[in-house]
Amino acid sequence: VIVVAVVACLVSVTVAFVVENHEEEPLRMRSSAPAATTVLPTPSAASKPLPSCRYADAPATDVAYSDWQSTLVDPTFTLPPDYYPPGLVPVSRAGFGGSGAVRSFVIPQLSALRQAAAAAGHPIAINTAFRSYGTQQAVFADSVALRGHAAALQRAARPGHSEHQLGTTIDFESAGMVDVTQAWGSTPAGTWMAENAWRYGFVLSYPKNRKPVTCYDWEPWHFRFFGVQVAAQIHASGLTTRQYLWDERGR
Ligand SMILES: [Zn+2]
Protein backbone atom coordinates (compact mmCIF):
# COMPACT_ATOMS: atom_id res chain seq x y z
CA VAL A 1 0.00 0.00 0.00
CA ILE A 2 2.84 2.37 0.83
CA VAL A 3 4.50 1.73 -2.54
CA VAL A 4 1.26 2.48 -4.39
CA ALA A 5 0.76 5.66 -2.41
CA VAL A 6 4.28 6.86 -3.20
CA VAL A 7 3.84 6.13 -6.90
CA ALA A 8 0.51 7.90 -6.93
CA CYS A 9 2.10 10.87 -5.24
CA LEU A 10 4.93 10.96 -7.76
CA VAL A 11 2.47 10.81 -10.62
CA SER A 12 0.30 13.58 -9.26
CA VAL A 13 3.34 15.79 -8.79
CA THR A 14 4.38 15.06 -12.38
CA VAL A 15 0.88 15.86 -13.64
CA ALA A 16 0.89 19.16 -11.77
CA PHE A 17 4.27 19.98 -13.27
CA VAL A 18 3.07 19.18 -16.78
CA VAL A 19 -0.08 21.27 -16.41
CA GLU A 20 1.88 24.23 -15.14
CA ASN A 21 4.21 24.08 -18.06
CA HIS A 22 1.41 23.60 -20.59
CA GLU A 23 3.03 20.55 -22.03
CA GLU A 24 1.84 17.07 -22.65
CA GLU A 25 4.44 14.42 -22.06
CA PRO A 26 2.66 11.21 -21.16
CA LEU A 27 5.44 9.00 -22.48
CA ARG A 28 8.13 10.53 -20.31
CA MET A 29 5.74 10.44 -17.38
CA ARG A 30 5.17 6.73 -17.84
CA SER A 31 8.85 5.90 -18.27
CA SER A 32 9.76 7.71 -15.06
CA ALA A 33 7.11 5.85 -13.08
CA PRO A 34 6.61 2.52 -14.82
CA ALA A 35 4.71 0.88 -11.95
CA ALA A 36 2.01 3.53 -12.19
CA THR A 37 0.65 2.21 -15.46
CA THR A 38 -0.51 -0.99 -13.79
CA VAL A 39 -2.03 0.73 -10.77
CA LEU A 40 -3.51 3.95 -12.08
CA PRO A 41 -5.38 4.95 -15.20
CA THR A 42 -3.06 6.34 -17.84
CA PRO A 43 -3.07 10.11 -17.62
CA SER A 44 -4.18 11.78 -20.81
CA ALA A 45 -4.94 15.28 -21.98
CA ALA A 46 -8.64 14.51 -21.75
CA SER A 47 -8.39 13.69 -18.07
CA LYS A 48 -6.96 17.09 -17.17
CA PRO A 49 -9.61 19.36 -15.83
CA LEU A 50 -10.29 22.52 -17.79
CA PRO A 51 -8.55 25.42 -16.03
CA SER A 52 -10.78 28.04 -14.49
CA CYS A 53 -11.02 31.39 -16.25
CA ARG A 54 -8.33 33.78 -15.13
CA TYR A 55 -6.37 36.62 -16.63
CA ALA A 56 -2.77 35.74 -17.32
CA ASP A 57 -0.26 35.87 -20.14
CA ALA A 58 0.81 32.26 -20.45
CA PRO A 59 2.15 31.57 -23.94
CA ALA A 60 -0.38 29.64 -26.03
CA THR A 61 0.75 26.27 -27.30
CA ASP A 62 0.23 25.10 -30.89
CA VAL A 63 1.07 28.52 -32.28
CA ALA A 64 2.58 27.40 -35.58
CA TYR A 65 0.53 28.94 -38.38
CA SER A 66 -0.29 25.41 -39.53
CA ASP A 67 -1.82 24.66 -36.09
CA TRP A 68 -4.73 27.05 -36.66
CA GLN A 69 -7.26 24.35 -35.72
CA SER A 70 -5.57 23.59 -32.39
CA THR A 71 -4.49 26.95 -31.01
CA LEU A 72 -6.21 27.67 -27.71
CA VAL A 73 -6.58 31.39 -27.11
CA ASP A 74 -8.43 32.54 -24.00
CA PRO A 75 -7.98 35.05 -21.14
CA THR A 76 -5.02 32.98 -19.86
CA PHE A 77 -3.21 31.87 -23.02
CA THR A 78 -1.82 34.55 -25.29
CA LEU A 79 -0.58 34.64 -28.85
CA PRO A 80 2.76 36.34 -29.41
CA PRO A 81 2.57 39.96 -30.60
CA ASP A 82 4.19 38.97 -33.89
CA TYR A 83 1.63 36.24 -34.60
CA TYR A 84 0.44 37.52 -37.98
CA PRO A 85 -0.86 34.65 -40.08
CA PRO A 86 0.20 34.31 -43.70
CA GLY A 87 -2.14 34.32 -46.66
CA LEU A 88 -4.66 36.87 -45.44
CA VAL A 89 -7.08 37.80 -48.22
CA PRO A 90 -10.06 40.17 -48.36
CA VAL A 91 -13.47 38.73 -47.47
CA SER A 92 -14.69 40.13 -50.78
CA ARG A 93 -13.32 36.90 -52.27
CA ALA A 94 -16.22 35.16 -50.52
CA GLY A 95 -18.67 37.75 -51.82
CA PHE A 96 -18.81 39.91 -48.69
CA GLY A 97 -18.50 43.67 -48.49
CA GLY A 98 -16.29 45.54 -46.06
CA SER A 99 -12.56 45.61 -45.54
CA GLY A 100 -12.13 42.43 -43.46
CA ALA A 101 -9.52 39.77 -44.15
CA VAL A 102 -9.25 36.06 -43.38
CA ARG A 103 -6.74 33.32 -44.16
CA SER A 104 -7.25 32.23 -47.73
CA PHE A 105 -8.29 28.65 -46.93
CA VAL A 106 -11.39 29.98 -45.14
CA ILE A 107 -12.78 31.53 -48.33
CA PRO A 108 -14.51 28.54 -50.00
CA GLN A 109 -16.60 27.62 -46.96
CA LEU A 110 -17.17 31.27 -46.08
CA SER A 111 -18.65 31.73 -49.52
CA ALA A 112 -20.79 28.61 -49.10
CA LEU A 113 -22.03 29.87 -45.72
CA ARG A 114 -22.95 33.24 -47.21
CA GLN A 115 -24.95 31.60 -49.98
CA ALA A 116 -26.68 29.14 -47.64
CA ALA A 117 -27.69 31.89 -45.22
CA ALA A 118 -29.08 33.98 -48.07
CA ALA A 119 -30.93 30.99 -49.50
CA ALA A 120 -32.48 30.38 -46.07
CA GLY A 121 -33.73 33.97 -46.04
CA HIS A 122 -31.08 35.30 -43.63
CA PRO A 123 -28.47 37.21 -45.63
CA ILE A 124 -25.41 37.82 -43.46
CA ALA A 125 -22.59 40.32 -43.45
CA ILE A 126 -19.22 40.51 -41.74
CA ASN A 127 -18.72 42.93 -38.88
CA THR A 128 -15.11 42.04 -38.03
CA ALA A 129 -12.64 39.45 -39.30
CA PHE A 130 -8.85 39.40 -38.76
CA ARG A 131 -7.42 41.73 -36.14
CA SER A 132 -3.70 42.09 -35.62
CA TYR A 133 -2.17 42.29 -32.14
CA GLY A 134 -1.74 46.04 -32.67
CA THR A 135 -5.36 46.51 -33.68
CA GLN A 136 -6.55 44.54 -30.66
CA GLN A 137 -4.32 46.75 -28.51
CA ALA A 138 -6.17 49.79 -29.85
CA VAL A 139 -9.58 48.12 -29.46
CA PHE A 140 -8.86 47.23 -25.85
CA ALA A 141 -7.41 50.66 -25.06
CA ASP A 142 -10.55 52.31 -26.49
CA SER A 143 -12.71 50.05 -24.34
CA VAL A 144 -10.68 50.92 -21.23
CA ALA A 145 -10.97 54.63 -22.00
CA LEU A 146 -14.73 54.27 -22.41
CA ARG A 147 -15.59 51.95 -19.53
CA GLY A 148 -12.62 51.58 -17.24
CA HIS A 149 -10.32 48.58 -17.04
CA ALA A 150 -12.58 46.20 -15.10
CA ALA A 151 -15.55 46.69 -17.42
CA ALA A 152 -13.34 46.59 -20.50
CA LEU A 153 -12.11 43.13 -19.53
CA GLN A 154 -15.71 41.92 -19.77
CA ARG A 155 -16.21 43.40 -23.21
CA ALA A 156 -13.00 43.06 -25.16
CA ALA A 157 -10.11 40.64 -25.21
CA ARG A 158 -6.73 41.95 -24.18
CA PRO A 159 -4.17 42.06 -27.00
CA GLY A 160 -2.88 38.56 -27.75
CA HIS A 161 -6.00 36.99 -26.28
CA SER A 162 -8.39 37.49 -29.20
CA GLU A 163 -9.29 34.67 -31.57
CA HIS A 164 -9.52 37.34 -34.26
CA GLN A 165 -5.71 37.39 -34.35
CA LEU A 166 -5.81 33.86 -35.76
CA GLY A 167 -7.22 35.09 -39.07
CA THR A 168 -9.90 32.39 -38.92
CA THR A 169 -12.45 34.10 -36.71
CA ILE A 170 -15.33 36.27 -37.83
CA ASP A 171 -18.01 38.39 -36.18
CA PHE A 172 -21.13 38.09 -38.33
CA GLU A 173 -24.28 40.15 -38.40
CA SER A 174 -27.29 40.45 -40.67
CA ALA A 175 -26.75 42.28 -43.93
CA GLY A 176 -27.51 45.97 -43.47
CA MET A 177 -26.92 46.06 -39.72
CA VAL A 178 -24.79 48.86 -38.28
CA ASP A 179 -23.67 46.86 -35.26
CA VAL A 180 -24.50 43.53 -33.70
CA THR A 181 -25.64 42.84 -30.12
CA GLN A 182 -26.75 39.83 -28.09
CA ALA A 183 -30.32 40.49 -29.23
CA TRP A 184 -29.27 39.33 -32.70
CA GLY A 185 -28.75 35.85 -31.28
CA SER A 186 -32.50 35.51 -30.77
CA THR A 187 -33.46 36.70 -34.25
CA PRO A 188 -34.18 34.17 -37.01
CA ALA A 189 -30.82 35.05 -38.59
CA GLY A 190 -28.85 34.59 -35.38
CA THR A 191 -30.69 31.37 -34.64
CA TRP A 192 -30.03 30.06 -38.13
CA MET A 193 -26.32 30.81 -37.74
CA ALA A 194 -26.12 29.08 -34.35
CA GLU A 195 -27.82 25.99 -35.78
CA ASN A 196 -26.12 25.80 -39.17
CA ALA A 197 -22.76 27.58 -39.35
CA TRP A 198 -20.91 24.47 -38.13
CA ARG A 199 -22.01 22.65 -41.30
CA TYR A 200 -19.72 25.08 -43.14
CA GLY A 201 -16.89 24.74 -40.65
CA PHE A 202 -17.70 27.69 -38.37
CA VAL A 203 -18.26 27.08 -34.64
CA LEU A 204 -19.73 29.55 -32.15
CA SER A 205 -16.96 30.17 -29.62
CA TYR A 206 -19.06 31.67 -26.83
CA PRO A 207 -22.55 30.14 -26.66
CA LYS A 208 -25.31 31.28 -24.33
CA ASN A 209 -25.00 30.42 -20.62
CA ARG A 210 -21.55 28.81 -20.94
CA LYS A 211 -19.44 31.57 -19.43
CA PRO A 212 -17.96 29.35 -16.69
CA VAL A 213 -16.23 27.29 -19.38
CA THR A 214 -15.84 29.78 -22.24
CA CYS A 215 -14.85 32.73 -20.00
CA TYR A 216 -17.07 35.05 -22.07
CA ASP A 217 -20.68 36.11 -22.13
CA TRP A 218 -22.81 34.94 -25.02
CA GLU A 219 -21.43 36.28 -28.31
CA PRO A 220 -23.90 34.98 -30.91
CA TRP A 221 -21.91 36.73 -33.67
CA HIS A 222 -18.43 35.30 -33.01
CA PHE A 223 -17.53 32.20 -35.01
CA ARG A 224 -14.18 30.49 -35.45
CA PHE A 225 -13.43 28.42 -38.54
CA PHE A 226 -12.21 24.86 -37.93
CA GLY A 227 -12.93 23.30 -41.31
CA VAL A 228 -15.99 21.17 -41.96
CA GLN A 229 -14.67 17.94 -40.47
CA VAL A 230 -13.39 19.30 -37.15
CA ALA A 231 -16.39 21.60 -36.79
CA ALA A 232 -18.65 18.56 -37.14
CA GLN A 233 -16.63 16.79 -34.45
CA ILE A 234 -16.92 19.74 -32.09
CA HIS A 235 -20.64 20.02 -32.77
CA ALA A 236 -21.14 16.31 -32.11
CA SER A 237 -19.10 16.49 -28.89
CA GLY A 238 -21.47 19.02 -27.37
CA LEU A 239 -18.42 20.80 -25.95
CA THR A 240 -17.56 24.44 -26.34
CA THR A 241 -14.47 25.10 -28.43
CA ARG A 242 -12.40 25.96 -25.35
CA GLN A 243 -13.27 22.61 -23.73
CA TYR A 244 -12.68 20.74 -26.97
CA LEU A 245 -9.31 22.35 -27.61
CA TRP A 246 -8.21 21.77 -24.03
CA ASP A 247 -9.09 18.08 -24.31
CA GLU A 248 -7.32 17.78 -27.66
CA ARG A 249 -4.11 19.46 -26.53
CA GLY A 250 -1.06 17.31 -27.07
CA ARG A 251 -2.90 14.40 -28.65
ZN1 LIG B 1 -15.46 38.38 -32.19
Image (cartoon, rainbow, N blue to C red):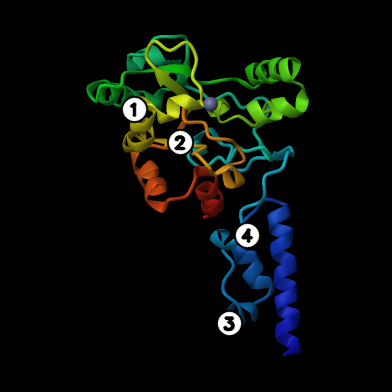
- Disc 2 secondary structure class: strand
Dot 4 amino acid type: Glu
- Is ligand 1 closer than 8 angstroms to the Cβ of mark 4? no
- Disc 1 secondary structure class: helix
- Is ligand 1 closer than 8 angstroms to the Cβ of mark 3? no
Q: Earlier in the sequence, mark 2 or mark 4?
A: 4
Specify the label residue 204 is tagged with. 2
Q: Which residue is rendered at x = 74% and y = 59% of the image?
A: 17
Specify the label residue 188 is tagged with. 1
Specify the label residue 43 is tagged with. none
- Which residue carries the number 4 mark? 25
The quadrant in which residue 40 appears is bottom right
Q: Which of marks 1 and 4 is nearer the N terminus?
A: 4
Instruction: Tell me how far mark 3 sits from mark 1, CA to CA.
Output: 54 Å
The quadrant in which residue 119 appears is top left
Location of the N terminus (image quadrant)? bottom right
In the rendered image, residue 70, in percent from the top left (x then y), is placed at 51, 42
> Label 1: how many residues lie within 10 Å, few (<14), some (14-19) or many (20+)?
few
The quadrant in which residue 211 appears is top right
> Label 4: how many residues lie within 10 Å, few (<14), some (14-19) or many (20+)?
some
In the rendered image, residue 88, in percent from the top left (x then y), is placed at 47, 19
